[in-house]
Amino acid sequence: MSFISVKKLWKEYGDQVVLENLNLEVKEGEFCTLVGASGCGKSTFLKMLLGQETASRGELSLQGEQFPGQPDRNRGIVFQRYSVFPHLTVRENVLLGLELEQKPLLGKLFGKARKDALAQVDAMLEAVGLGHALNKWPHELSGGMQQRLAIAQSFIMKPRILLLDEPFGALDPGIRGDMHDLILKLWRESGTTIFMVTHDLHEGFYLGTRLLVFDKIRNDPQNPEAYGATISYDLPIGQSDPQLYQSIESSVSETSRQLSA
Amino acid sequence: MRQINRHPGRVSATLLGLLPFLLIALIYSIASQERLADNPNDKLLPGLEQMTAAVDRMAFQEDRRSGDFLMWQDTTASLARLGIGVGVAALLALFVGILNGVLPLVRANLAPLVSALSMVPPLAILPILFIVFGLGELSKVMLIVIGTAPIMMRDVAQRVRELPGEQLIKIQTLGANSWQVITRMALPQVLPRLIDAVRLSLGPAWLFLIAAEAIASTEGLGYRIFLVRRYLAMDVILPYVIWITILAIVIDQCLRFTNRRLFPWYNAGGH
């Protein structure tokens, strides 16, 4: 049995079909990147994995069991923005998850327990390259630093699944490269299953183990909402030749043109 | 150069700001002098001399009848009512506002009531307060609470709902239960916003305080102003009004300062 299995999954909002007939099997420890035009249901699929949305039809299961209907500590998330808490310092932001888990009522650690947890926190922050900024406020950090913090915040919980919703979309290209290295390093060390949504086809092509392209195979020019998107390509990374890249690129941009028309 | 692009320098900005104050003082003193030249016993526009004499009498000499320093007595009585009223209102606002903002079931249940209550003109129910709570301290404090709490409740709930949805999801993925979402995410982020709401509510709070004191009281700044009105004692009323204004400004600035000190992340644009 695979770790995550998706069978004949549909998602509709009224007449609007977002996802149609999605089928997917994912093994534990895979790093899947999700690419596709805006409005092709990548984020909707991510929200279903998170428990924020439920499927209209079909099956979405985690090790044979139905997906939990609300977010929990086993599934971490990093958004493009607003993932960190502005009222907590860098250290406190990462400490928060440990505190919430160990103290259901107070939500705060004191004394030796806090000291032990902080040692763990500092090691995590060192690993993401924020060792020098432990006591800063998030607003004092650059965009890239804030994303490093959000990643540390999620990884310290050792989630079984980590969802990344265009985490590097707002960053400068140079910094994006550093972030790729970071996320790959953490993924190898932790063995977490990662799903990453990205706009950047190039990013999707070499990061991770598997590329999932979300695209509309059928299109009705009179009624663009009649058909949903599905996974049009499901490729293992490393087998990608330039021609395929070109063909995916043009297919995705064709869909996005039709959607925005 | 266009007017919208002309900016004053530091010194000229200060001077421009001072100018209206000086003008008002000047116009007043000319008018006052003219009236006093006609009739040295004129009460309508007292000069500086009469006003300092009145302040001296009210603040620094014992009252002949009661032996109290009236202005201080009035000030402490009024500030106590204002403080208790606004304090209770702020606590209520925090409690109801956070529950309304965080819990959809509570919101469905309470938000319409809070909205309706905030539309009731508080002065219209002042007679009810006097009937129910008597003419003592309680009815005056209640007027301030009823007058300011519903609007602050709505404000706090709104601020909670303005927190980015991403945060709410994120804290759940860190394992927070509903209680922890309130205590570790909503409450700490809403506190500085509550202080801002209190600052905005102080204007109405003073209004309700003085209205209540004017109608039924035996001491207080509002009571004194309305009492001496019977003798046309502008020499007391004007200094009292200036004193109330100064108190309002000082309280407002103290709250602003507290906000800055307690929540450095909030005021540096971290929200």
Image: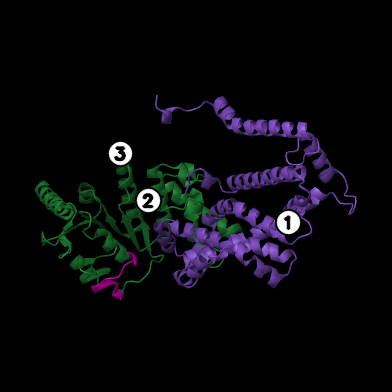
* Contact between labelled residues 1 and 2, with CB atoms less than 8 Å apart: no
Q: Are marks 3 and 2 on the same chain?
A: yes
Q: Nearer the viewer, mark 3 or mark 1?
A: 1
Q: Which class describes the residues within 10 Å of circle 1: few (<14), some (14-19), or many (20+)?
A: some
Lateral position of residue A125 relative to residue A188, left or right: right
Question: Does B248 sit left or right of B77 as displayed?
Answer: left
Name the kind of residue labelled 3 in the image: Gly
Numbered tag placed on residue B80 in the rendering: 1
Say above or below: B15 vs B167. above
Q: Color used for chain B?
A: purple
Q: Residue at x 25, y 65 (%)?
A: A27
Which chain is depicted green? Answer: A
Q: Position of residue B232 (x, y in %)?
A: 76, 47
Tell me whether marks 3 and 1 sit on the same chain: no
For residue A239, say whether it is visible. Answer: no
Cα separation, mark 2 vs mark 1, equals 45 Å
In the image, which disc is placed on residue A81?
2
Circle 1 — which element?
helix
Which residue lies under the disc numbered 3? Answer: A174
Q: Give, as a three-letter code, the residue at label 2.
A: Arg
Residue A122 visible in the displayed image: yes
Whether A137 is drawn above or below B191: the answer is above
Q: Are marks 3 and 1 in contact (CB under 8 Å)?
A: no
x and y, in percent, of residue A11 in the image: 23, 68
The crowding category of the residue bearing disc 2, from other C-alpha atoms within 10 Å (few below 14, some 14 to 19, many at least 20), is some
In the image, taking residue B103 as reference, residue B204 lies left or right, namely right
Whole-percent x, y for residue B168 in the image: 43, 60
